[in-house]
């Protein structure tokens, strides 16, 4: 059984390090140019270099998105940018535009992954891009497992499949709702998520929806139940979406899928509810299986704006730990008080709970609560923790 | 510049053939998106003979996004194409290119991806694929079209008139919504072609259609190109009139208006379409958010 790559998103260096430390084999990031969701990215070239160096020390990979569909004037600076990425030694670019792919091939030896923005739904289309230099394709999210299996049987190209996170309800790359409704180009980083807005539906001018607004919005993808099947099919990379998500979300989701993939490949009996329970500790959106079981039904849609609350709250990030005093220095992320029951999330061991017996600031003053964002605090923890471990409040 | 017209229904074909148009674009059963009617290969063969008798060309619209269960239909269609003597094939899915190449018919292809062709570099890429023509992204400005057209990289085809779609989901969104709310019978309403959606803080009514390929949402107003016809004429090689949502009378009128306008500019024709149509993105530059600010 071939173990697939676990690919995670990162919007900044901290998220990137968390993703890699919690078990991602590779991380995709966007630079300031040529990338969709550029505003979700904080990676200047220097940051990308630091990201690559960090990842390569761990024998892991960094892919950089250059996935806009550029107009002619947007191509200025592309060659220099791609050459810089090559010098930095990124492991691949993720591109959707024939222009960018062509220029990358002509001027660099960068590995090219074809973005899901191309919405490839069959092996013929996959092979088209493979013959033109794509080492890997990120498949359309509209494919069910039977289609993925057929695809695997007819191509040698590396296949990447989304397993978790937000989804375009349109075929990706084909939507211009934003362009038309807000003048923002959805294929150049401006998607306004118009598909998630509320509408009324009319037939010849007569309103047909009553109490609930018409909506096209989909629930997020969550494919815990299908990982075993995707591994069996021979998918090469399993992708988590969400460059704007918090470090707690990334740590929880990446850590859970890491454990799940490892357990499946190590032939350990898996209990799906256990992994689902863990993901719910950080998930704040309703989820569904997308197209994993075939054509979507009303159950995969979002007909009101109700969100889920995570079952546990991220309250602090471990910066250091003194074994002698059994005290951690943590950075506060959400309010907590003395007496709270907390849990340590770590890439090194399964979650362990403890009671917050005391909170002190760095000057040694005892505090009743931790209410200042990013304040550094001393908190006794009765077992060893390490930097990048996280504290989360256990809700009763 | 050639004039091409999407065939909305077979009943209108003879009237179209009397017009001074150059190309008729025909929908293919199971392989065309957003056509009012599509036809099996036998019917297309008959139509092709008739169209050729009038010294006009026949293009097939094979613009569907294809999943694996449609690939055998695609192979079947290409197996018959040599006998049909088709003059061009519009396509969006790269499977069509792959199959066409196996049949050595890629020279008939016109790439019509709607969004992916937005730069002169893209056009060069497709010229290298040895195809007949490309249709540029519909969100390009007139200046973009002019700039690319001037370079004469390869023949350009342009959808210059009609309702353009702006969204396609594989999901049956109308049916699923009414299954959830039970406001209407989902089985009845899902096939209706007279539905629109209106966003809660906007006034425009966007046509929405669910069919066997999913759900399509169209721009509120159809595109018309009379205002900018001089530039279009010098920039592109084939001008396409998309006839979806128009009735026979309107289609004939639109064709007559373009043919007349092509002979001499007529302010009355411009005015006739001024309120019911718009000029799309010809003069509306969309924003590129590149991470350096709120748009450049």
Image: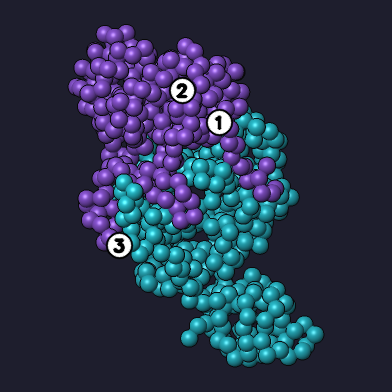
Chain colours: A cyan, B purple
Marks 3, 2: nearer the viewer: 2
Q: Which mark is residue B181?
A: 3
Is residue A231 shown to the viewer in this render?
no
Earlier in the chain: of badge 3 and badge 1, it is 3
Determine if residue A365 is in view. yes
Residue name at image x 61 percent, y 73 percent? A389
Label 2 with label 1: CB-CB less than 8 Å:
no
* A115 over B254 or under it: above or below: below
Q: In the depicted view, which residue is nearer to us: A39 or B278? A: B278
> Measured from the top left, where is residue A109 in percent x and y?
62, 35
Q: Left or right of A392: which side holds A48?
A: right
Eye-nearest disc, 2 or 1: 2
Looking at the image, tell me whether mark 3 or mark 2 is earlier in sequence order. 3
> Residue A127: x, y in percent?
42, 34
Q: Compute the Cα span from label 3 to label 2.
A: 45 Å
Chain containing mark 2 = B
User: Mark 1 falls on what kind of element?
Assistant: loop
Residue B282, numbered circle: 1
Give the residue at x 49% y 55%.
B201
């Amino acid at each position: 059984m071939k173990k697939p790559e676990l690919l995670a998103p990162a919007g900044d260096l901290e998220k990137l390090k968390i993703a890699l430390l919690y078990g991602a084999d590779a991380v995709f990031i966007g630079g300031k140019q040529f990338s969709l969701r550029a505003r979700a990215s904080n990676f200047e070239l220097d940051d990308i270099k630091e990201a690559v160096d960090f990842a390569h020390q761990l024998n892991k990979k960094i892919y950089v998105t250059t996935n806009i569909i550029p107009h002619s004037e947007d191509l200025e600076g592309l060659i220099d940018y791609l050459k810089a990425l090559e010098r930095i030694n990124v492991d691949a670019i993720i591109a959707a535009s024939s222009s960018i792919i062509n220029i990358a091939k002509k001027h660099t030896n960068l590995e090219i992954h074809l973005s899901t923005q191309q919405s490839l739904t069959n092996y013929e289309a996959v092979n088209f891009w493979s013959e033109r230099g794509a080492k890997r394709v990120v498949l359309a999210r509209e494919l069910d497992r039977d289609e993925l299996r057929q695809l695997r049987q007819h191509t040698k190209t590396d296949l990447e499949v989304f397993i978790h996170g937000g989804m375009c309800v349109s075929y990706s790359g084909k939507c211009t709702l934003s362009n038309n409704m807000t003048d923002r180009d959805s294929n150049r980083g401006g998607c306004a998520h118009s598909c998630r807005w509320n509408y009324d539906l009319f037939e010849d001018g007569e309103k047909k929806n009553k109490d609930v607004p018409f909506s096209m919005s989909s629930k997020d993808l969550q494919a815990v139940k299908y990982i075993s099947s995707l591994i069996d099919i021979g998918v090469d990379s399993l992708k988590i979406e969400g460059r704007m998500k918090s470090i707690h979300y990334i740590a929880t989701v990446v850590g859970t899928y890491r454990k799940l993939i490892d357990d499946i490949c190590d032939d350990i009996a898996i209990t799906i509810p256990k992994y689902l329970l863990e993901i719910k500790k950080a998930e704040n959106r309703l989820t569904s299986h997308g197209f994993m079981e075939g054509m979507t039904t009303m159950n995969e849609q979002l007909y009101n704006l109700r969100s889920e609350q995570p079952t546990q709250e991220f309250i602090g990030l471990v910066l250091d730990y003194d074994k002698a005093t059994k005290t951690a220095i943590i950075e506060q992320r959400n309010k907590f008080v003395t007496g709270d029951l907390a849990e340590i999330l770590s890439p090194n061991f399964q979650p362990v709970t403890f009671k917050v017996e005391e909170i002190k600031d760095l000057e040694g003053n005892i505090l009743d609560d931790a209410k200042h964002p990013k304040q550094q605090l001393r908190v006794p923890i009765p077992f060893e923790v390490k930097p990048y471990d996280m504290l989360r409040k256990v809700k009763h | 510049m050639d004039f091409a017209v999407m065939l909305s229904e077979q009943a209108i074909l003879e009237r179209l053939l009397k017009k001074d148009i150059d190309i008729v674009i025909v929908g293919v059963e199971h392989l065309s998106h957003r056509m009012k009617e599509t036809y099996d290969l036998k019917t297309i063969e008959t139509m092709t003979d008739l169209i050729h008798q009038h010294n006009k060309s026949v293009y097939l619209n094979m613009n569907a996004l294809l999943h694996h269960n449609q690939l055998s239909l695609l192979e079947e269609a290409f197996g018959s194409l040599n006998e049909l003597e088709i003059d061009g094939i519009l396509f969006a899915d790269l499977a069509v290119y792959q199959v066409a190449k196996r049949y050595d018919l890629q020279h008939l292809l016109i790439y019509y991806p709607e969004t992916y062709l937005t730069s002169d570099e893209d056009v060069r890429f497709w010229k290298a694929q040895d195809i007949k023509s490309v249709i540029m992204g519909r969100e390009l400005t007139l200046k973009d079209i002019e700039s690319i057209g001037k370079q004469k990289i390869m023949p350009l085809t342009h959808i210059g008139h009609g309702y353009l779609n702006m969204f396609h989901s594989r999901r049956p969104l109308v049916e699923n919504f009414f299954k959830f709310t039970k406001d209407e019978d989902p089985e009845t309403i899902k096939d209706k072609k007279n539905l629109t959606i209106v966003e809660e803080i906007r006034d425009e009514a966007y046509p929405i259609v669910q069919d066997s390929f999913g759900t399509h949402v169209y721009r509120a107003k159809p595109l018309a190109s009379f205002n900018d016809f001089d530039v279009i004429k010098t920039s592109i090689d084939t001008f396409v009139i998309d006839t979806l949502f128009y009735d026979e009378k309107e289609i004939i009128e639109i064709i007559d208006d373009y043919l007349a306008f092509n002979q001499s500019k007529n302010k009355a024709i411009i005015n006739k379409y001024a309120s019911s149509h718009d000029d799309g993105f010809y003069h509306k530059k969309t924003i590129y958010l590149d991470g350096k600010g709120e748009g450049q």
